[in-house]
Image (tube, helix red, strand yellow):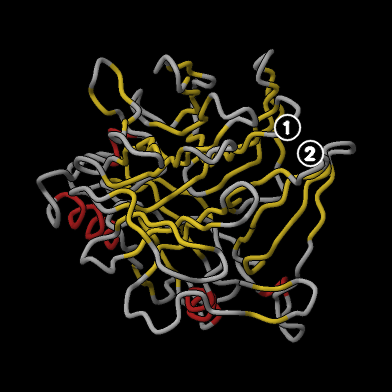
Amino acid sequence: IHDLSTGTQTNITANTTDALASSFAWSPGGSQIAFCSDRAGRFDTYIMPSQGGEARIVLDQHHPDWEVSWSPDGRTLAVTAEGEGHDYWTFLVPLAGGQPTPISIDNSPIPAKDACWSPDGRSLAFASNLLGQFQIAIYEVASGGITWLTDGQGEKEYPDWSQDGYLTYVISHGPKSELAVMEIASRQVSKFRVEPGVIYTPKFTPDNQQIIFGFDNPRRPSDLWSFRRDNARFQQLTHSLPAQLDQSELVMPEEVWSPGLDGVAVPALLYRPQSGGDLPPALITIHGGPNWLTQITWDPLLQHMVSRGWVVLAPNYRGSTGYGRAWMNANLFDLGGVDTDDVAAGADF
């Protein structure tokens, strides 16, 4: 805990050997914190006093928990956990007791993540790729009804709900993203972009006047940014790029589609050195995950290689996220098969 008045920090989980997931949530009023820990051998959900003390487990199931959000009335946690295959499920956990309830259709859990409570606590906004690409939907807690707010191209994720009836979220088109603001009542959406790059987890400020988010790209390390709703202007709040580095020497990639060994087009990012011969050395860089993707983001090692005259290709092989559910599941039961072929085809390209 960081005390803003004194500038001091207190470790409230000192002398523990467990790992903690990066998502945690304050209770309304701030007396407790919910978090996910592997202290019992798997990531489960706990709550504990915010000043330190004994933690008690509130969700213990067969799937690891990753994200937690506390309802405005303090009675319920929304917990996102790994589900089946590549999917995530979101459970509503009553803290007074009772069975956790997954967001479901016809009693079957559906893919659901990035849960965000409405200000009145009656609804949850969440992201789901049930329909192919990630779209934003609202779950009514009392009835279990689901209303889809978005459709069309682009992966919509990380919603946040304002006090005045708006949602903000991220729209990703493959490796790059933009900020969206929707008036929920009318479904009117406005989209904004800093420049090609990646926006992370936008959040409304308590006065609803700004949206705070993380942003980076190959010329900008990850920093905090602000978007003002009154004039639609972006402002960089932190500055992490070392002063001795020249932004103009950092290379932005091209988006390309290279043929796989079976002829299917595979999306990739291609970095070309600013100077070099007709046939410079080349490198294929392979992202981890496997459910992940290479985005237009900050990567010092990659920039170092390009600065030395190397061409770098970063394929988003079958199994990568960012291009819809079908592409993400295209290597199911074939891990190390078609995805490796796509990478090998990148060398031919």
Q: Quadrant of residue 187?
A: top right
Q: Which mark is residue 208?
A: 2
Q: Residue at x 30, y 18 (%)?
A: 105
Q: Residues within 10 Å of mark 2 (few under 14, many from 20)?
A: some
**Left or right: where does residue 55 sit relative to residue 162?**
left
**Labelled pair 1, 2 in contact (Cβ < 8 Å):** yes
The amino acid beneath tag 2 is Asn
**Left or right: where does residue 268 sit relative to residue 264?**
right
Q: Residue at x 27, y 53 (%)?
A: 64
Q: CA distance from mark 1 to mark 2?
A: 7 Å
Q: What SS does tag 1 mark?
A: loop
Q: Quadrant of residue 131?
A: top left
In percent of width and height, residue 129 lies at 37, 31
* In-front residue for pair 245/236: 236
Quarter in which the C terminus is drawn: bottom left
User: On the image, numbered disc 1 is attached to which residue?
Assistant: 163
The amino acid beneath tag 1 is Gln
Q: Which mark is residue 109?
A: none
